[in-house]
Image (cartoon, rainbow, N blue to C red):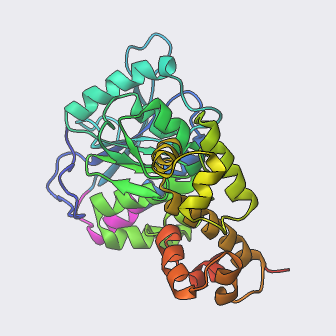
């Protein structure tokens, strides 16, 4: 495939015969606001880049939309900012979808085409529920990927060979990039602008659109959503008890007694059912409560730490920062709900 797939450092090949093509895939239920928004971001980035390099008379970026019409075996371009240019996409993007994630039957024709494109050198990316269509290609097996945090569990069940990290907003695996929440299309678009046109153009594009450049994480926004449909009644009983008591008593003996299980058996079953050790699980419950107190309350962080069961605020500060990705003070400044 043509068009600078190896130019990950933002170098622009002024002698290239064809512009670098970024294709946006129009599948059933795709969010057109994201498709059109990315189209605008790429168009402005191309304009900014060409101002810095006035030599080329053709675009440096080619933006296309790919759709599979009834009767078509594979998708084809239905929109193209450089019609007649040679080559194939350097990158194909699966934007977020509206409604339920795309089902396997709907995804099948796209999945084969995407695999063929990837085999020929095209890199692939997804945003939010677009990851479900990308997962149908089989290319995510063994990879760490992200999607919207509320869809992490359905994604795990549908694609157990992939490793889902819902705390990350964007995961760049070179030939495959996955982005988390619905609005993470801005982060993915800016990352691609950085990749193909360089960091200066990326920053200038972000400034034009008044959006943050890549660097934030989905963990800033996501709430802990524990697995409750695993079918292990003893573990579920403990989960409900921890929720009701704000996870303030978390010693192993107490938890195993609540479950009615021997301690080693309880630990094994708890991690299998929830995906977390008891320590990790309780830390996330406590951090969730602390986020609420920081956002809506006036307690100092030391008081918040005590309120959620920590006698050592310093230790809890480290736990909070590791899980959320922001310090408690930064979190409060960013998300505090103030009366208008």
Decide which of 319, 92 is in the foreground and name it: 319
In the rendered picture of this protein, how many numbered marks are placed on residues?
0
Q: Is residue 136 left or right of residue 246?
A: left
Percent from the top left, x then y, of residue 300?
Answer: 69, 89
Report the quarter where the C terminus lies. bottom right
Percent from the top left, x then y, of residue 138?
Answer: 33, 29
Rendered position, 83 above or below 55: above
Name the residue rendered at 50%, 68% in the picture: 323
Residue 230 within the segment the image draws in magenta: no
Percent from the top left, x then y, of residue 53?
Answer: 26, 68
Name the residue rendered at 42%, 19% in the picture: 108
Q: Is residue 177 left or right of residue 233?
A: left
Considering every residue shown, the one lying at the far left of the view is 15
**Residue 220 seen in render:** yes
Percent from the top left, x then y, of residue 158?
Answer: 47, 30
Considering every residue shown, the one lying at the far right of the view is 340
Q: Is residue 151 left or right of residue 195?
A: right
Rendered position, 123 above or below 251: above
Q: Which quadrant of the view contains residue 309? A: bottom right
Q: Which residues are magenta?
A: 45-56
Magenta-highlighted stretch: main secondary structure? helix
């Amino acid at each position: 495939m043509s068009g600078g797939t190896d130019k990950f450092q933002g170098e622009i090949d002024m002698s290239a015969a064809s512009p670098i093509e970024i294709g946006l895939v129009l599948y059933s239920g795709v969010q057109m606001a994201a498709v059109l928004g990315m189209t605008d971001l790429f168009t402005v980035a191309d304009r900014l880049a060409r101002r810095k390099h006035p030599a080329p008379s053709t675009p440096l970026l080619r933006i296309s939309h790919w759709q599979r019409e009834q009767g078509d075996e594979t998708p084809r371009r239905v929109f193209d900012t450089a019609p007649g240019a040679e080559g194939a996409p350097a990158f194909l993007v699966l934007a977020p979808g509206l409604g339920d994630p795309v089902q396997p039957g709907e995804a099948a024709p796209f999945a084969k085409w995407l695999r063929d494109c990837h085999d020929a050198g095209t890199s692939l990316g997804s945003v939010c529920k677009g990851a479900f269509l990308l997962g149908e290609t089989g290319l995510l097996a063994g990879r760490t990927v992200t999607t919207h945090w509320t869809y992490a569990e359905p994604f795990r069940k549908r694609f157990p060979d992939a490793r889902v990290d819902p705390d990350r907003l964007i995961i760049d695996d070179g030939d495959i990039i996955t982005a988390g929440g619905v609005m993470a299309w801005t982060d993915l678009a800016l990352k691609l602008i950085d990749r193909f046109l360089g960091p200066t153009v990326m920053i200038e594009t972000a400034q034009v659109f008044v959006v943050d450049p890549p660097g934030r994480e989905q963990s800033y926004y996501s709430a802990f959503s524990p697995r409750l449909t695993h079918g292990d009644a003893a573990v579920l009983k403990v989960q409900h008890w921890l929720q009701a008591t704000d996870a303030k008593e978390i010693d192993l003996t107490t938890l195993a007694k609540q479950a009615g299980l021997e301690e080693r058996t309880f630990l094994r079953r708890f991690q299998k059912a929830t995906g977390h050790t008891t320590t990790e699980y309780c830390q996330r419950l406590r951090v969730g409560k602390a986020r609420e107190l920081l956002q809506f309350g006036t307690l100092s962080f030391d008081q918040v730490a005590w309120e959620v069961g920590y006698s050592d605020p310093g230790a809890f500060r480290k736990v909070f920062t590791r899980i959320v990705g922001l310090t408690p003070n930064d979190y409060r400044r960013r998300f505090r709900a103030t009366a208008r």
